[in-house]
């Protein structure tokens, strides 16, 4: 079997590379200190070539955040919609979002949090999209609760806790670490779905009755 | 019973207020745009009065982070050390850390993450202290694992996931919300210790055998 050689990246792949590289440079140097030239140099492009992909530094932060939220929608939220079973859907959302966060060393995820650097109109757009994702995540938990499958937990706290675990991955994941993004995503799903303490060790104190045959 | 009236804040309480207010202003305006005057005004102090508590803007970020990590040590890490049972210790660490994060609208927690704004020497100090906390948290999980009380999870991923859940609280907790810091801390502990899905709903797919009497 032949490996594909000299594969030409599609326009979308190149755009993704531009945004991920720009995000990494902005995180390292700060937005003010980053020039369009810095980004072009890091990508091995001319400034004119880079302007084929971006509309300017002024819009760059918003464009990077929009790109990150588009990716989240296309690869996680939209496909999750077609999974009828809420437990399966929750597992899919957690593992898929975790994979996305590890791309480009998590720089886009960290930047999406830097919303105060945007104009008020841009802030409203990004906040509305984040809110929409949050509502879908919590909706899945509410469905599990309605079906009697959820532990006795507050679904708002649970949804934010899932976001926290997954988003935090951007701060500690190392591509050269012992675990792949897929493995870490599965671990995070396991922790949030099943908890850390073995059920037979939870005892009476936590209000769970252990039935032994 | 009389309520204490006109209680004079101790020097420590005043210092805590200085750091929390400074952190909130820096988060809102950005470090560069924040002046010592802004902080003094927000506290209703003179600039000279404020200099009784801080050594200057240059050291302020590092001092705020150090204050936050001191608080974490004094109220969470050090008392946790004397709790012999690792499950109880884990519960204590999670709930206590969650309470700390909600103070001052989470500004200090968010700033402690802004480590690149520090000098290299300051970065090393803060990183070493964060690492020490992480090691103690993971050590508690390793102890649970050694005692056969932990689910089959990677303790590094689990420790970072706990930090993510707790630190994320700084971004979504609202003092005027429906739940108190204590209630949210208990919810987070419940989620991470016991998981979201009811044990009797986990089924064969997740590799847990359900024993019915």
Image (spheres, coloured by chain):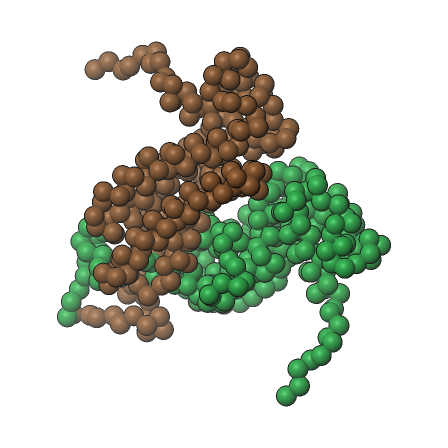
Chain colours: A brown, B green
**Quadrant housing residue B12:** bottom right
Q: Residue at the location (66% across, 56% down)?
A: B20
Horizontal and vertical percent position of residue A125:
47, 40
Q: Residue at the location (43% across, 31% down)?
A: A67
Q: Residue at the location (38% across, 46% down)?
A: A132
Horizontal and vertical percent position of residue B94:
47, 60
Which quadrant of the rendered structure holds the N terminus of chain A? top left
Q: Residue at the location (40% across, 58% down)?
A: A156
Horizontal and vertical percent position of residue B37:
78, 49
Which quadrant of the rendered structure holds the C terminus of chain A? bottom left
Instruction: Give the farthest residue toward the bottom.
Output: B1
Left/right of residue A13 with respect to residue B205 in the rendered view: right
Depth check: A135 or A42 in front? Answer: A135
Q: Is residue B148 visible?
A: no
In the depicted structure, whether residue A103 falls above or below residue B213: above
Instruction: Give the farthest residue toward the right.
Output: B48
In the depicted structure, whether residue A7 falls above or below residue B27: above
Horizontal and vertical percent position of residue B95:
48, 63
């Amino acid at each position: 079997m032949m490996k594909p050689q000299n594969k030409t990246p599609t326009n979308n792949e190149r755009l993704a590379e531009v945004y991920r590289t720009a995000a990494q440079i902005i995180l390292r140097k700060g937005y003010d200190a980053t020039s369009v030239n810095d980004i072009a140099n890091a990508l091995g492009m001319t400034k004119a070539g880079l302007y084929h992909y971006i509309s300017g530094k002024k819009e760059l932060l918003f464009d990077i955040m929009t790109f990150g939220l588009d990716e989240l929608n296309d690869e996680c939220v939209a496909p999750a919609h077609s999974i009828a079973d809420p437990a399966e859907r929750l597992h899919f959302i957690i593992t898929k979002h975790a994979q996305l966060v590890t791309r480009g060393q998590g720089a886009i995820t960290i930047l999406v949090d830097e919303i105060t650097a945007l104009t008020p109109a841009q802030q409203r757009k990004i906040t509305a999209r984040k809110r929409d994702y949050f509502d879908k995540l919590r909706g899945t938990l509410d469905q599990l609760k309605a079906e009697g499958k959820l532990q006795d937990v507050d679904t708002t706290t649970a949804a934010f806790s899932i976001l926290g675990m997954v988003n935090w991955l951007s701060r500690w994941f190392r591509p050269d670490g012992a675990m792949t993004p897929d493995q870490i995503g599965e671990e995070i799903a396991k922790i949030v779905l099943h908890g850390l303490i073995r059920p037979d060790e939870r005892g009476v104190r936590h209000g769970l009755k252990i039935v032994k045959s």
